[in-house]
Image (cartoon, coloured by chain):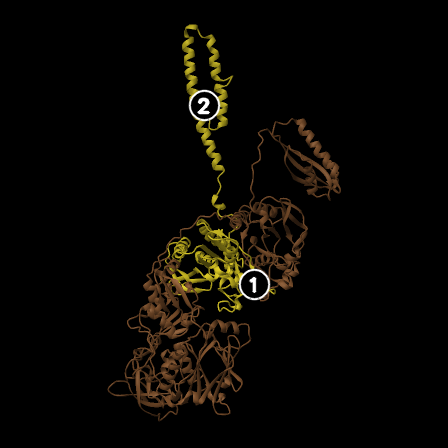
Amino acid sequence: MIITRSWLSEFVDLDRISDEDIYKTLNAIGLEVDSMRRYLVPKGVVVGEIQSCSKHPNADKLNVCTIDIGTKQPVQIVCGAANVVNAKFVAVATIGTKMGDDFEIKPAVLREVESFGMVCSASELGLPELNEGILILDDSIGELVPGKSLNDYPAIADTIIELELTANRGDALSIRGVARDLSVALKRKLMGFDFKPHAVEKDLRIDDVATVDMKDYLDADLSYTLATCKDVHNNLLIQIRLAFAGIEPRGKLDSLLQYTTHSTGVILKGYKAEVFKDAKNTVAIELSSRQKGIVEVLANDRVVSVLGVNQTPESIADDETIKVVIEASYIHPKLLVDAVSGSDIVTDNLYYNTSRGSEPELALGINYIIKLLEDNTSVRFVNGTLDIRSKQKPITLEMSSREICDIIGMEIPKKEIIRILKALEFTIDERKGDSFICTVPFFKQEVTNIYDITEEIVRIVGIDNIPPKPLNFTEVAYLNGATTQHQARKIIRNRCVGATFSEVLTYAFSDATKLAQYGFVAIKEELRLLNPIIDTLDTLRTTMMINLLEIVQKNINYNKKSLALFEIGAIFDENRKEREVISFIFSGAVAKESIINIAKPAPIDFASFVNKLANAIGKFELVPTTTQNGLIHPYQSADIIIEGKVAGYLSRLHPSVQEDFDLYDTFIAQIDFDAITPKHINARKISNYQGTYKDLSVVVDEKISLKPLMDSIAQLNILLLQDYYVIDIYQDEALGSNKSVTIRFFIQSMEKTLQDGEIEMLMQQILAKLHESHGALLR
Amino acid sequence: MKALEEKIIDASSLEALEKVRVEVFGKKGILTQEFAKLKDVPPAEKKDFAQNLNTLKEQLQALFDTHYATIKKLEIEQMLESQKIDVSLYSNISNKGSLHPLVETMDKIIDYFVALNFSVEVGPMVEDDFHNFEALNLPKNHPARDMQDTFFFADGKLLRTHTSPVQIHTMKKQQPPIRMIAPGCVFRRDYDITHTPMFNQIEGLVVDQKGVVSFANLKSILTDFLKYMFGDVDVRFRPSFFPFTEPSAEVDISCIFCKGEGCRVCSQTGWLEVLGCGIVDSNVFEAVGYKDVSGYAFGLGIERFAMLLHQIPDLRSLYEGDMRLLEQFR
């Protein structure tokens, strides 16, 4: 929404109010200023009155003009524009005028004819381009005095303000609408529009030549008038203001209609009257509303427009049309939007206004266009208008100033609240005490409750004038699951960082093709994402591994040789149920090259990866994996067991995937986040007696994995066994298809120092068990 | 005597000194031999002889001890010197990982509100129309509900476009008073230099009895919060519009780069828009069945905070795992 200072001042007195004040006030009252720019034409450009104009003796396309520029003698200027021939008043850049950084107007000789100045086009003056050729001035911008600086005309040297209006401010979609708010904030009166049309055929009443027939009840207000136009003209003021506002009319009549709508907010349309003429030569307008919110205008049973939505091109009155039906309309935006959304009705550029709420005071628009036509056209109107009024009732709200003050948190006297509301054109019926009844004007379609009323007050009082006040509240212990989860995430993240992993975040989307390629589940067809933003993010992710692999790949391209990453976030299952996991990826060298590893860090291997992972997430057991996806290395992968449950998996990256992404040796892991949240710990009793370390080396079949071996020791349930773990595995030719496993035991009693004999017995017991269960023999 | 003293002083290492010790004080040493002579001394001279000898021994022992300490100290010093290393070689060889600046910023925000007795609440990313729009006073066809912005699923569900549905979930399962924040990722169909299809928000909501919670309270907490985040900045509230709050405001801070003078980051305005807030619209309370309550709500984009706080130039780099950026946050 673009407004100009001079245009605004037609509706509110801006005398002695600076542009800066306007800028601040608009922002303060919720009409956000997007940009503000003052137009100034070059100093030295003045009004010139052409006294004579003749063809250049030596050049076909040039004219030699004598122009009064307020000096004693008129000056001679050679001009190349064709339209100078019929011009009277023009903009003249006088000698010495700087038209740009390196262009100064100097006396010149053009094909042997002297020229003392330049007749300017709009674009040469830095104004929007209005027409081909030079800018032709008329008195719509004020009295034209030869020699008067163009910058002294407020309509030319105007300030253009672009507002970024929020969706609830349909009432501010016109110059008058903005002026109405501004007038309240600046405490200046909104100027009325007092106008009596005089080009009216007193004896020809509109009823005599036109009829309106309603087929259904209409939720709309309408007003029709009939004009006979000749020589439609639009003056410079209208042209330049429309150009400043970025409005591009289709013709002169259209420019008058659009100018009226932009000025007043009333939606106007012009029809060729002939399309409505019936057999009796009467302009017969039919209105129909088969659906709530959709009001059709019919001419001879054919739809020529839908109110607030569109109009058929054939029915649009143009500059050649003599008999014009002018229609002002209003329809409640909610009704309109509900009906239009989801339908396939084509909407025109006015729908932006009608869908947010146009001005319901139709007489304002009708009178304004009548005045414009009278000023710019030889026009005659028939007497009166044909009006339709919907049964829409104004909203009335009962409230008290106390409630409003409580919402704002500041004391504002009832008197002031009432003053503001009245100025904003609310009707107030004061009641006893602090209460009152407030009737909402039709143009404030969004106001439906006390909060909306409070908003009006806050805007005008000024949000910055509300003193901040801390809230007194009731203490409640809010340490719920989500809060604890947040704390846990913080702890785990810091541990991961200590274990050399860096945190990344990726999108919750992934590439469905890649997920399928690497054997991850797809979200069910009936739950799929309908409108992905790009092909490579076309589904919710069922793993974050693909995203992490892509990140690693990209960073290798940035010359990174070692990457350790983790992400905590959601992944989804085939039923689109979300679950929080933590994923790890380690690719390349185990550490950065440094003095410690003499610039030759080893590549990451299974043991180092598991070690780093354990430093990050704590204790876990590994068993051969049951997880299946295309990233997993079948012989270097494991399920991660935490507290007896499978919590995730880890694996070396499958070599063919490593090749696909062009990576170094890479390891991956994914663990359910819930499984690693820090647990409550109770202290164990500590023994004060001497403990003993004992190593036991046994020979078993090489196919036996360590897990069952250790499990069978656990089955013995020996209390004295405080700890035991494998420290070596050895194989050589002499052992054949067997391997030697060395297990270290820590044996300690809570009650006494153990005798050698007791320890020996214990070791025998363990050996016997391993022999019995796995055929293990002492090495 | 002089000769013995010289022997001790001449010893230049602990090893040599040990030899002298044996030679002088040892079982077969010179002093022992001198003491052995005592038996041959006439009784009248015995006392003097012994006394002299003892004095001599004491003097020699004292000399020995002092010299021993000197040599010992010297040797330790030599050993220390031989163990000298260039410590500067070991600067910055950490392999510590880095924390993501976005998550760190989110945590910093959460910490503030948790310290002010707010609970942390969460909700699902896949939402229904009611929680994401309808209950938040965004009825179907509302202009603020732009179809282009929302990701939809085949079954009619959608990806939440803001964290506000968490307000609705929380209000439906709890009764006032409510003091909550809802951090989390949200989704909009936008992808360019200043938009990513996923981003993070924090939403705040306070609900209490009617007449208790006011706009002035909102101004108070947000002004304090923004000073906590950005230091000594000016805070400005501008009236705005959000469907779920009324009155609504956008909140700006004075530009932290140019101190309000006007620069490229603040588009020469001197102000940076950082959050939106307002008094909860009664339609929202109606949708969750609350009566006679008052409340405020606010919401902010964490990316913007992180980018401003850490001077990160490109939004998209936050989600693309560019370690050239992220590694700096060690």
Q: Please state which of residues A271 and A489 is positioned toward the viewer in this rendering.
A: A271
Chain B on-screen colour: yellow
- As drawn, the chain in brown is A
Q: Please state which of residues A54 and A218 is positioned toward the viewer in this rendering.
A: A218
Which secondary structure lies at badge 2?
helix
Identify whether A188 is placed above or below A260. above
Q: State the mark number for residue A307.
A: none
Which secondary structure lies at badge 1?
strand
Q: State the mark number for residue B7.
A: 2
Q: What residue type is disc 1 on? A: Leu
Q: In percent of the image, x 55 and y 75: which residue is there? A: A344
**Residue pushed farthest top?**
B43
Quarter of image, res A644: top right
The percent position of residue B234, horizontal first and vertical second, equals 36, 58
**Across the whole image, how many numbered discs are drawn on residues?**
2
Q: Is residue A156 visible?
A: yes
Q: Is residue A89 left or right of residue A736?
A: left
Q: What residue type is disc 2 on? A: Lys
Labels 1 and 2 positioned on one and the same chain: yes
Q: Please state which of residues A209 and B204 is positioned toward the viewer in this rendering.
A: A209
Quadrant position of the C terminus of chain A in the picture? top right
Q: Are marks 1 and 2 in contact (CB under 8 Å)?
A: no
The subunit carrying tag 1 is: B
Work out how far the residue at label 1 is from the one at label 2, CA to CA, in angstroms: 98 Å
Quadrant position of the N terminus of chain A in the picture? bottom left
The percent position of residue A96, horizontal first and vertical second, equals 29, 80
* Residue indicated by mark 1: B158
Q: Is residue A669 left or right of residue B87?
A: right
The subunit carrying tag 2 is: B
The percent position of residue A154, horizontal first and vertical second, equals 32, 77
Identify whether A535 is placed above or below B322. below
